[in-house]
Amino acid sequence: MADEQLFYLIKLTVKELVSKTFALVCIVSPKGKTSVERFEAVVSPSPDTTAITSTDSYKDCANRVQKLILGGFSSQSSTNSLVNYLKTTFNNDESFMISFSHYLETNDLEKLKPLLQQYVVKILGRGDFESNLFVSQVTKSDLDSISSPQVQEKEVTLKEETKKPSSIPLDAKLVPFHFILSPVTGTSVGDLKKGDQILLKISPDNEEAEEVIESLGLKEENMILPCTGTITETIHNKDKSVQVIVMLADKIFATYTEEEPEVRIRMAESNIAQDVTIDEKRYINEVANSGERSWVIPAVIIIGIIILLWIFVVFFVI
């Protein structure tokens, strides 16, 4: 047992607070070596991404990553970019690997966290981040162990419920979406009710979502346009998170689970009002601009009259 190879198990979770984007990176590095044996990484709008604890194994993390990807809850392009960044760094950046191994050996987590987090930040962009880093030493058999069956069963059940609520027809399409936030004038997620219309943006994270985006005409110049959805159901979970299911069209639904019910989002009505206001402002500006130009003709007429009066005075009065 004393000769058994030990490994560092590194688990990093990152949450971007504004866009509500989550990332998970799990790394296995042999103790005493400057190398990475394997790793998993995913970027997703799902809060489940960062539901990792200090006791979760590498297998637990790998299973979570695969469920997010196969379930259509990962951000495919961002995930691919993050994986490529990390793969290139682990294979080619000697300076990084020396620092990485040194911080592991000295248990300097304060320096290890920003060293790893920089690659997630490159993908998510600038913002407000919350992150957690867990590091432990494990054996090879520990890497492939999984949580208790009860925990696994609960997790699978929760994921199935999130993916296909009972209120959605079996033959309907279900795609992930993002809320469009409105921190000042928006409505709290916890206050949403059936029949409300909200603005949202479909996440193009799988083929089905891409098909829905195309069928609804929501792609313009490689950009995904927002759309309106009618809430058909809100599910308030025991952990205080709220799952919102909306109908986009006949047999086309979208779902998102928000872990912070107080987050304010934009309603469809407020957007329409905003659009009208913008149109009104544009009209007023046009009128104002035309008003600025309208003084030219009256001024020419007045000047002409003055010249005629001057000529009349000079030649006829004097």
Image: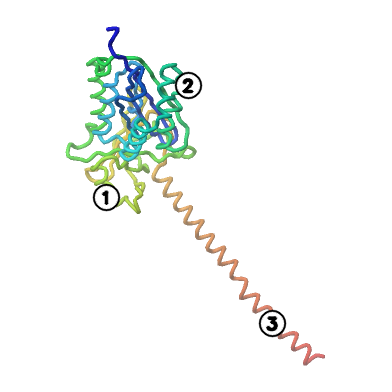
SS state under label 3: helix
What percent of the width, then of the height, locates residue 190? 39, 31
- Image quadrant occupied by the N terminus: top left
* Mark-to-mark CA distance, 1 and 2: 45 Å
- Image quadrant occupied by the C terminus: bottom right
Residue 305 image label = 3
- As displayed, is residue 17 above or below residue 311? above
- As displayed, is residue 67 above or below residue 305? above
Residue 166 image label = none
Q: Amino acid at mark 3?
A: Ile
Residue 149 position by quadrant: top left
Q: Amino acid at mark 1?
A: Glu
Q: Earlier in the sequence, mark 2 or mark 3?
A: 2
What percent of the width, then of the height, locates residue 162? 27, 30
Which residue corresponds to mark 2? Answer: 110
Residue 168 or residue 55, whichever sits in front: 55
SS state under label 2: helix
* Mark-to-mark CA distance, 1 and 3: 64 Å
